[in-house]
Amino acid sequence: MPPMQSAEFEQMMDDFVREHTRTSGVVRFRREESVSVLIRPVKPIRLVPENDDVFGLDEGLYEETETDETPTVTRPVLVASEDRENAYWKFLSAQMRTVLQSIVGYSELIEEDLLAGELMAPLSDLMRIRSASAELLDMAHQIEELLFLEREKRHVAEKLGALARQLNYAVDRRSIFVSLLSSIASLIAFGEACVLEPNSCQDWDLVTRWGRDEGTDKDPWIKSACLGVARTTQPCVQPLQDGGMVMGFPIRVDGACVAVLLLRGVFDRREQAHHAGVVMAFVEQVEKALHGWRELDEIKNLAMYDGLTGSLNRRTFFDLASGDTSLRSVVMLDIDHFKSINDTYGHGGGDEVLREIVKRIQVTLRDCDIVGRYGGEEFAMVIQVDKPSLAVDIAERVRLAICEEPVELPSGDAIAVSASLGVVTDEGELEHLLGRADELLYLAKSLGRNQVCGEEN
């Protein structure tokens, strides 16, 4: 028998009370009103995996879908459930009140019959009480499950809040993923977990790992799982040959998969749906944080780097290099005959030359060295060497890297380019050293261009 509507149920109860009320106001039950009539069956709440009302996962989690890399994956579908859960709580409470009233009423009838010497009627009433008590125990069990899941929801919400606070103070992407794994590990039991990022070689780099040493990042299951997860937009489950399974979660920012979260363990179907709902909530939190980091990185790049060449802009170059007054080498570089390049090939051709020259400079210098666009076709460098002869040698390698190969334009034209450089090795303020290097740069130009001039040569 289907559950009654709330209004219909309440009306039935009001009619019943009015019909069976004594002068004392106590409800009196008739034997012909059996428990099955008074107690409308409650549709059992269907917890995971059939219908996870708590974590918003529908049975669509178990729709099977084929992919090229994985034999079978399962994906969840989100559904709203809070209103339905509240309505169920209200109806369940009303049903329990009715069961208790029936037990009290039949107990009164039994007492009266026994006092009157009647024996058969009380036996029938006892059977009804037994049936009502079984209904009551079943409802109590359902309430216990609902209360347990409600407590777990609050626990998850607290962990989500803690993760949000941690992400506000994250210093890099790795710290974001470490916080993610730590939060999940406090809620879910799994064998091991890891987060990986795609690289430029169409492979995956391990960012962080939980449950095993981070040096073991070449396990075959990791790569095969990544291939399947990266192509989805929802969590998926992949069985493993050892009897376990991998639950994979793509981490996406602006539609692109920027990382993959993998959980390895043994999960039954109920746990799969539960874990998927919990982890998805944390992954969404991380995706928002990564989106904010991406926007912040874009703003920083616009503020720090030259938009045309990708080198440091003048302001950032001075910010990074001005604080040091110790012994170091400063280089000024100017592209020879750059105006004629613009006149011959247009500004588009000149821009392409500037970009290519910066690439050649960056390849030649070390990570500890700094290069920035000083203005127009002039570039400044700070080289961390304290010997003038070594600084001149490095500047010479930069000059050769620029002039040995022509710059090829998209149009097919090849432009022969060269540069003149001035080098100073000394202590002191950056602006003073740049001024001296600039004088040596113009000396190199006056001597015929395409050469390096230092104070000692």
Image: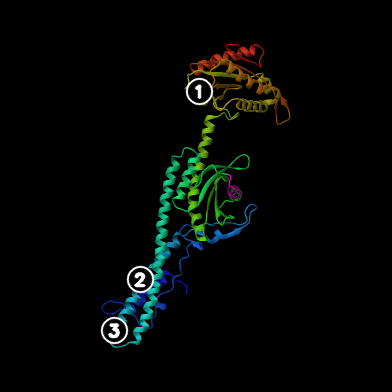
Disc 1 versus disc 3: distance between alpha carbons?
100 Å
Residue at which label 2 appears? 97
SS for callout 2: helix
Determine whether, in the image, residue 318 is placed left or right of residue 158.
right
Residue at which label 3 appears? 112
In the image, is residue 356 above or below residue 266? above
Q: Are marks 1 and 3 in contact (CB under 8 Å)?
A: no
Q: Earlier in the sequence, mark 1 or mark 2?
A: 2
Q: Are marks 2 and 3 in contact (CB under 8 Å)?
A: no
Splitting the image into 4 quarters, where does residue 123 fall? bottom left
Crowd around label 3: few <14 · some 14–19 · many ≥20 (10 Å): few
In the image, is residue 111 above or below residue 344? below
Residue at which label 1 appears? 321
Residue 342 place in picture, x, y as percent = 67, 23
Disc 2 versus disc 3: distance between alpha carbons?
23 Å
Residue type at mark 3 is Glu
Which numbered mark, 1 or 2, is in the foreground of this view? 1
Q: How is the image coloured?
A: rainbow
Farthest residue, direction bottom: 117
In the image, is residue 44 above or below residue 187? below
Residue type at mark 2 is Arg
Residue 361 place in picture, x, y as percent = 61, 25
- Residue 67: which numbered mark, if any? none
Residue at 51% of width from left, 25% of height from top? 315
Residue type at mark 1 is Ala
Is residue 20 among the parts visible in the rendering?
A: no
Determine whether, in the image, residue 278 is placed left or right of residue 31.
right
Splitting the image into 4 quarters, where does residue 368 fall? top right
